[in-house]
Amino acid sequence: MGTGSYLPRAKARRLLEQRGNTTLAKDRFKVIDMYFSIWTNQYPYQLVNYLTPLDQKNGWSTEVVNDHWSIVFRNMLDAADRLYTALLTNFEETNKDPFAREEEEPYVSDRHTRSPCHNDKCLFMTSLDPFPDPKEVVFKGDLQTIDEQNAKFMELDYPTTEFWRTFAYVHAVDNDPLTCWNSFKVPKIGDSFGLRFVKPTALQRLTVVSSKSLTVLEGQMTVLASDMHGVHWTTCQHTVRYPFAHTMTLDFVCPSGPSLPQGLLHQIKVQLEADLEKSLEICGMDAGGMVL
């Protein structure tokens, strides 16, 4: 919410119900976005994009405060404490539990949509996630501060801030060949990358540009297409050529079917059929003449 996120109306209504069940003071309304994020009791789903900075001094509001992060962390702890207390309450009698208790779909492992393309006509997709599974951190109820919680995550195999700033998902489709996305982890069989289009598209060629040689992918991949739902995937017949070692062009034909009416597709992906030895890097793509 604090960065212009969209949310379903139902969750906004649920926030009002949650506020009533936790007796949240009116002064907390100024930071209600922090409470909303935690009270969803879900893993956040954030697409990576270049954010336009707000007209604020040093990235914060102009209100005179010595330590902004202490205020943020205090509100986060308060929201988490109120959530924990609410989850201990039994709402079975009223059947009106304002707090979610089950993980929503798509699950974290199924969230392959990563970043909008620079022209907002497509989305970059990949199964490759540089961050550790949040479930790998086991809490014993002994943490007293947010810093202690962050330290638990940083003990895992986590990309540095500099790495993420340089190789974030958005750099694969930002129309800048000098910036690149790097998978961080070494791709395994079954991993994939591709595009999801806003409108059904007649696509027969996809060019991928990297700063590294892409010839290692020859004979090690399958091209798949699907409709907007991405439930059923159709295997496309493809040929591959390399104008340069770091440039790979895929020419493919996808048969029409229930998921691809008239051969139009909403999603296209390249799926690996073997493990790679090094991380994957993509600096740009050309989808049938649409340069990304």
Image (cartoon, rainbow, N blue to C red):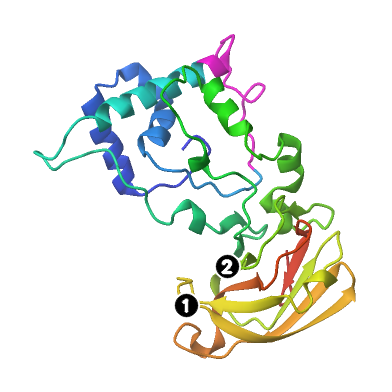
Residue range of the region highlighted in magenta in the rendering: 51-70
Left-right relation of 23 to 180: left
Between 145 and 137, the one lying in front of the other is 137
**Quadrant into which the C terminus falls:** bottom right
Q: Which mark is residue 232?
A: 1
Between 148 and 142, the one lying in front of the other is 142
Q: Residue 289, how many percent across, how many down? A: 74, 75
Q: Residues within 10 Å of mark 1 (few under 14, many from 20)?
A: few
Residue drawn 79% across the image and 57% down it: 278
Report the amino acid beneath label 2: Arg
Q: Is residue 150 above or below residue 137?
A: above
Residue drawn 65% across the image and 78% down it: 223
For the residues labelled 2 and 1, the Cα–Cα distance comes to 14 Å
Residue drawn 48% across the image and 87% down it: 261
Secondary element type, mark 2: strand
Q: Residue 109, how many percent across, how many down? A: 50, 55
The single residue placed furthest to the right in the displayed view is 244
Q: Is residue 63 above or below residue 271?
A: above
Q: Residue 39, how many percent across, how many down? A: 35, 34
Q: Earlier in the sequence, mark 2 or mark 1?
A: 2
The single residue placed furthest to the left in the displayed view is 93
Question: Residue 191 falls in which quadrant of the image?
Answer: bottom right
Left-right relation of 95 to 196: left
Q: Is residue 4 visible?
A: no
Left-right relation of 210 to 165: right
| Chief secondary structure of the magenta portion | loop
Name the residue tied to disc 2: 196
Residue drawn 50% across the image and 20% down it: 73
